[in-house]
Image (spheres, rainbow, N blue to C red):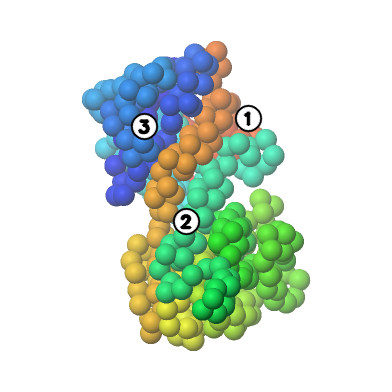
């Protein structure tokens, strides 16, 4: 079985789908690994590192695509790349099937089998494959560092001969993986941290990290699905949360927003009036910018100023920490590939409770019913 790794071509994308240590494991499992020349440079890995791990380095991208039984990527390949692959080949990566399902039509029409890392189910057996959580961990960490770098003050409480410097105040909206990592990072830097989440169950995790949990009465409505993700709420429920957030935003130096609903526009947690009521010099890091943003006025990958308040909405923070982001993602991908490799051969078992739910297209058909319904 030939496993191929591409040089990612997305703007500012420095990650690579497989790191050399993962290549060694796949070669030990009797797979042949082919890496496009220069694919690992952004993650500080050279062609020689891959050769030493047992991979073959290929300069011809077209030949690599044509011979691949499995193509492992970070971001969805282009339509042109899909068309260069042989029928029946497998593509594995972040394919955005719920955000841009039509972009996978060329893969379906070409008879490719596609597995999306976004669709890996949140079950115990699949924890080692949870790439969304891995990348959210990196994003939550880096978001706080961005905020700390831009605010005109320091994070920790300092007792000096010139007087006391009070700690910065950080507000985190959304206590999923990214939010919890943001809380932990802000606490390590010495900030006073508050956090809000529609899921009351998140309160215990927030408090365990030393932050204050902000609760709002939502009347007992269901706020999360079976996978632990937040569900889309009514406008009334969202407004109750916005009112609470606006009150606490007035004293915040840094706000990190992380609220996402898979396949939906990100919920608006901060209206323009809440932003205008913040202190001059405050920073908002909106991690939901790619799906509309949690903050009114935020723009993907742009810096917006509102009455002395800075709003940033970076859409790919993991790519700014490419070494560790690639290591985590590579391990997630390798764990998934182990489900497809049997004695060095490709074996796709759609009855498997991870493989089946993660599949988007197979043998010219849409396998994921949610994606199929979105297209129809």
- Of the numbered discs 3 and 2, the one sitting upstream in the chain is 3
- Residue for point 62% across, 43% down: 121
The image's mark for residue 351 is 1
- In this rendering, the answer to whether 343 lies above or below 287 is above
Q: Quadrant of residue 176?
A: bottom right
**Which one is in front, 225 or 152?**
152
Residue 33 seen from this side: yes
Taking the image as shown, residue 71 lies to the left or right of residue 161, namely left
Question: Which circle, 2 or 1, is nearer the viewer?
Answer: 2
Which one is in front, 263 or 50?
50
Q: CA distance from mark 2 to mark 1?
A: 38 Å
Which residue lies at the image location 41% right of the left edge and 23% below the top edge?
3
Q: Secondary structure at mark 3?
A: loop
**What's the distance in space between the residues labelled 3 and 2, CA to CA?**
22 Å
- Specify whether 362 is left or right of 214: left
Residue drawn 61% across the image and 70% down it: 192
Q: Quadrant of the N terminus?
A: top left
| Residue 224 or residue 45, whichever sits in front | 45
Q: Are marks 3 and 2 in contact (CB under 8 Å)?
A: no
Residue 180 higher or lower than 18, as above or below: below
Kindly identify which residue carries mark 3. 45
Q: Residues within 10 Å of mark 2 (few under 14, many from 20)?
A: many
For label 1, the crowd category at 10 Å Cα-Cα, with few meaning under 14, some 14 to 19 and many 20 or more, is few
Q: Residues within 10 Å of mark 3 (few under 14, many from 20)?
A: some
**Residue 75 is drawn in which quadrant?**
top left
Q: Earlier in the sequence, mark 1 or mark 3?
A: 3
Instruction: Give the residue number, with chain letter if any, for mark 2.
Output: 142
């Amino acid at each position: 079985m030939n496993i191929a790794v591409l040089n990612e071509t997305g703007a500012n994308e420095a990650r690579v789908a497989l790191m050399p240590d993962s290549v060694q494991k796949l070669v030990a499992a009797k797979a042949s690994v082919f890496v496009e020349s220069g694919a690992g440079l952004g993650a500080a890995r050279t062609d020689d590192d891959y050769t030493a791990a047992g991979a073959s380095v290929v300069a011809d991208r077209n030949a690599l695509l044509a011979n691949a039984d499995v193509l492992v990527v970070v971001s969805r390949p282009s339509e042109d790349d899909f068309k260069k692959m042989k029928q029946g080949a497998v593509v594995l990566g972040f394919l955005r099937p719920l955000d841009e399902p039509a972009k996978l039509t060329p893969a379906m029409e070409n008879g490719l089998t596609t597995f999306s890392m976004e669709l890996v189910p949140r079950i115990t057996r699949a924890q080692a494959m949870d790439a969304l959580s891995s990348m959210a961990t990196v994003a939550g960490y880096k978001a706080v560092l961005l905020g700390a770098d831009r605010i005109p003050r320091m994070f920790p409480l300092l007792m000096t001969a010139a007087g006391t410097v009070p700690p910065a105040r950080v507000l985190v909206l959304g206590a999923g993986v990214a939010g919890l990592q943001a809380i932990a990072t802000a606490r390590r830097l010495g900030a006073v941290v508050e956090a809000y989440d529609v899921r009351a169950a998140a309160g215990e995790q927030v408090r365990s990290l030393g932050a204050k949990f902000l609760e709002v009465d939502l009347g007992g409505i269901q706020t999360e699905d079976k996978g632990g993700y937040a569900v889309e709420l009514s406008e009334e429920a969202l407004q109750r949360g916005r009112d609470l957030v606006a009150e606490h935003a007035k004293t915040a130096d840094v706000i990190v927003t992380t609220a996402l609903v898979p396949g939906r526009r990100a919920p608006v947690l901060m209206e323009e009036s809440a932003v205008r009521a913040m202190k001059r010099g405050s920073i908002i890091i909106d991690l939901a910018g790619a799906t509309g943003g949690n903050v009114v006025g935020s723009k993907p990958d742009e810096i917006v100023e509102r009455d002395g308040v800075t709003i940033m909405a970076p859409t790919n923070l993991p790519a700014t920490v490419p070494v560790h982001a690639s290591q985590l993602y590579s391990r997630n991908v390798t764990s998934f590939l182990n489900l497809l490799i049997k004695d060095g051969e490709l074996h796709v078992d759609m009855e498997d409770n991870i493989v089946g739910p993660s599949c988007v297209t197979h043998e010219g058909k849409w396998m994921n019913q949610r994606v199929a319904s979105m297209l129809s």
